[in-house]
Amino acid sequence: MLDVEISNFQSIDHVNLRIEGFTALVGRSNIGKSAIIRAIKAALTGAPEDNYVRHLATCEKIVKGTKGCKCYCTVHLKTKDFDLLWEKGSDRNKYVFNNQEYTAVSKGMPSFLEDQFGLVKIGDSKTLLQVADQFRSEGGGPIFLLDESGSVIADVLSDVANLDCINVAIRMVEKDRKDCVAQRKVREKDVLDLKLKALSYEGLDKVLSRVSDVEKEVLQVLSQRAKCDRIRHFKDSIASTGKTLLDLQGALSVAPPEVAPVVTQHVKTKSLASFISSIRIRQEVIDVLKGVDTISIPLFEPLQEKKTRFGSLNTWLLKIRIYKDFFTRWKVLESVPTPEIAGLHQASKQALQLSSLCQRLAVVGQQIDRLEQLLVVVEKEYQIVRDEEKELGVCPTCTQPLNLTHDHGGD
């Protein structure tokens, strides 16, 4: 079994196929059968480019007319123990054989393929047995070894092929042919059925043409109907206008009143309307206050005395509620034993001491924070001074070089 993958080789854009035993490529002319054979042979023999590469429409060679380009073709042959990738172009001749890459390859068949695919002498010439030539370089010729003598053909076929495999392949091809004939009959029947169905559509063009004419006539009818609607609307408008004119006949003979008396009456009317509105509001107030005159006014002093007593009672009620809440909370204290006075005095003193220590601790913590901040500032200033000493190269105290050993009682 051999898996073949070919890309950008002559008429082939991309193709994948599998070869198992005897495999026949069939099909009409100029579809790439011969290109597949040439691609396999070119990969095995390291053939020169010889216009094998398929160039795209955007290729520099086509667009700008340059001699070289970056286009290249690839052929990948793979079996269980054999993996060969060939890339060929005007600036590329690369092999990857069994995961090992070869870029500097001389012309002709690579050395690492000669053991498996070397040319075999048949008669007076040498040929590659794995791939048969379809055409000869000089004129036309028969396929493979059919142009050799009978004894040579018999010897080669008996060494490299098994005639039983050929017979099996012939039977398989015959079976495929019969299947194709049967399928062809089915397709011919389908074509006949389609032709019969097509007969039922005869005259459809005339009907479609008539439908188009009817659609045009419908559009004309709709246009005329729209015009009729506009005319009907115009007639209705004329009738309404005529009726209005009839209603207004004689209006010109009526003398208009003088403006001054009308304005005076308008002002009086507005005043009367405002007066009526105010009367209504006052009447509502009077209705609400009906019976007020029958109520006797109480004396002021007794009311004042009752108000004072009510305030005192309200204050006592509030205090009683507060005391009640206190008694409810303190009721649980009845079961709590009374501590000794001496122990309370001792605990009070300890609490005061602890409070004083906490305050002193807080003050000390604040002082430590300030000292830490001051230490950071001092360290930064000290580092700046050290950097300046390094730049000067001498001690700022004794003006001696820093590389000499001297001490001033500290850094």
Image (tube, rainbow, N blue to C red):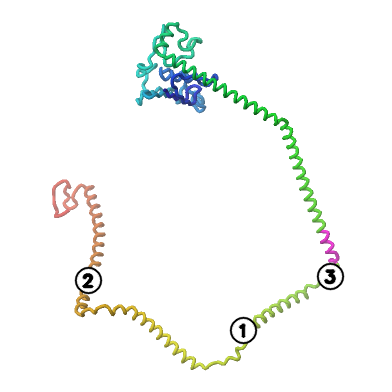
Q: Residue type at mark 2: give it.
A: Leu
Q: Nearer the viewer, residue 87 or 151?
A: 151
Question: Magenta segment: does it hold 254?
Answer: no
**Residue linked to disc 3:** 255
Q: Which residue is tagged 2? A: 354
The residue closer to the viewer here, 137 or 405, is 137
The quadrant where residue 212 appears:
top right
Instruction: Give x and y (percent) for residue 64.
Output: 50, 25
Q: Residue at x 71, y 32 (%)?
A: 204
Instruction: Give SS at disc 1.
Output: helix
**Could you say which disc has been placed on residue 268 in the image?**
none
Is 358 situated above or below 308?
above
Which residue is labeled 1 in the image? 288
Tell me the quadrant of the picture where the N terminus can be found: top left
Question: Do tag 3 and tag 1 residues touch (Cβ < 8 Å)?
Answer: no
Report crowding for label 2: few under 14, some 14 to 19, many 20 or more residues within 10 A (C-alpha). Answer: few
Examine the image and state in which quarter residue 381 appears: bottom left
Which residues make up the magenta segment?
Answer: 241-252
Query: Which secondary structure is most common in the magenta stretch?
Result: helix
The picture places residue 100, in percent across and down from the top left corner, at 34, 25
- Give the image location of residue 187, x and y in percent: 60, 25
Residue at 38% x, 24% y: name it: 80
Residue 323: x and y, percent?
36, 82
